[in-house]
């Protein structure tokens, strides 16, 4: 939607009273990502995200850029491991951890960098709530009817168990 209609769509929806999660999953060098996320904050969005695999320096730069917005800063979350990724996909990238363990590592890194939460599979939500605390937000996409799950997507039941938000 954003690619098709750009920031004016965001403004139009805000005028209609919607809070916007600008789900652009930024992933670039720290300075560039910080500027992109600051531009999202200028738009007045409610939540924005980056890829945790951009690393600690990137996430810290983004956190610092948003701190300048004080109480008006959007929630800042990081995508851990996309729900479409399976062990074989990670192995192709040279990552030998399981998707769940790699996601846990990225989620801990995200928390250490001061972000507000992560996007993760609902299958990981209960574990992450236990390991990272109740205040750390978990957004769980890819929720499917039970029995039709693909990759690391999960059922509504799994999502209800631990997540703060789902898509
Ligand atoms: O948007 C996301 O952050 C996202 C992260 C992720 O790990 N997996 C994932 O499926 N998504 C998004 O969640 C949505 C899932 O849609 P369905 O496949 O229709 O359930 C898509 O828009 C994906 O882009």
Image (cartoon, grey):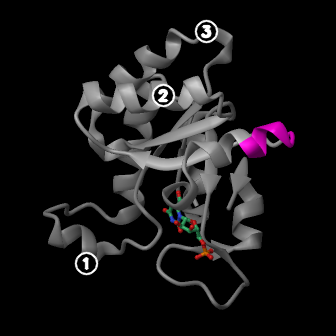
Q: What span is in magenta?
A: 12-17
- Percent across and percent down for residue 86 are 35, 75
Mark positioned earlier in the residue sequence (2 or 1) = 2
The residue located at (57%, 42%) in the rendering is: 7
Question: Which secondary structure is most common in the magenta stretch?
Answer: helix
**Residue drawn 66% across the image and 43% down it:** 10
Give the labeled residue for mark 2: 39
Q: Is mark 2 in CB contact (under 8 Å) with mark 1?
A: no
Residue drawn at (60%, 71%), measured in percent from left and top? 142
Q: Is residue 9 above or below residue 40?
A: below
Query: Is residue 76 positioned above or below 159 on the image?
Result: above
SS for dot 3 = helix
Label located before the other in sequence (3 or 1): 3
Q: Determine the image quadrant of residue 148.
A: bottom right
10 Å crowding of disc 3: few (<14), some (14-19), many (20+): few
Secondary structure of the residue carrying tag 2 is helix
Q: CA distance from mark 3 to mark 1?
A: 42 Å
Mark 2, residues whose alpha carbon is within 10 Å: few (<14), some, or many (≥20)?
Answer: some
Q: Which residue is mark 1?
A: 88
Q: Residue furthest bottom?
A: 147
Quadrant in the rendering for residue 95: bottom left
Point out the image quarter for the N terminus.
bottom right
Q: Which residue is mark 3?
A: 70
CA distance for labels 3 and 2? 15 Å
Where is residue 44 shown, x and y percent of the image?
Answer: 65, 27
């Amino acid at each position: 939607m954003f690619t098709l209609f750009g920031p004016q769509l965001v403004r139009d929806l805000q005028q209609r009273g919607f809070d916007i999660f600008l789900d652009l999953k930024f992933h670039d060098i720290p300075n560039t990502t910080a500027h992109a996320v600051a531009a999202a904050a200028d738009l007045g969005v409610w939540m924005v995200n980056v890829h945790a695999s951009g690393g600690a320096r990137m996430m810290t730069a983004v956190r610092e850029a948003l701190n300048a917005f004080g109480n008006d800063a959007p929630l800042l979350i990081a995508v851990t491991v996309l729900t479409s990724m399976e062990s074989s996909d990670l192995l192709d990238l040279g990552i030998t951890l399981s998707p769940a363990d790699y996601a846990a590592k990225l989620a801990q890194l995200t928390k250490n960098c001061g972000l507000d939460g992560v996007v993760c599979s609902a299958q990981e939500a209960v574990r992450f709530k236990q390991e990272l605390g109740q205040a750390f937000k978990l957004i769980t996409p890819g929720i499917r009817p039970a029995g039709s799950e693909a990759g690391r997507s999960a059922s509504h039941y799994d999502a209800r168990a631990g997540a703060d938000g789902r898509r």
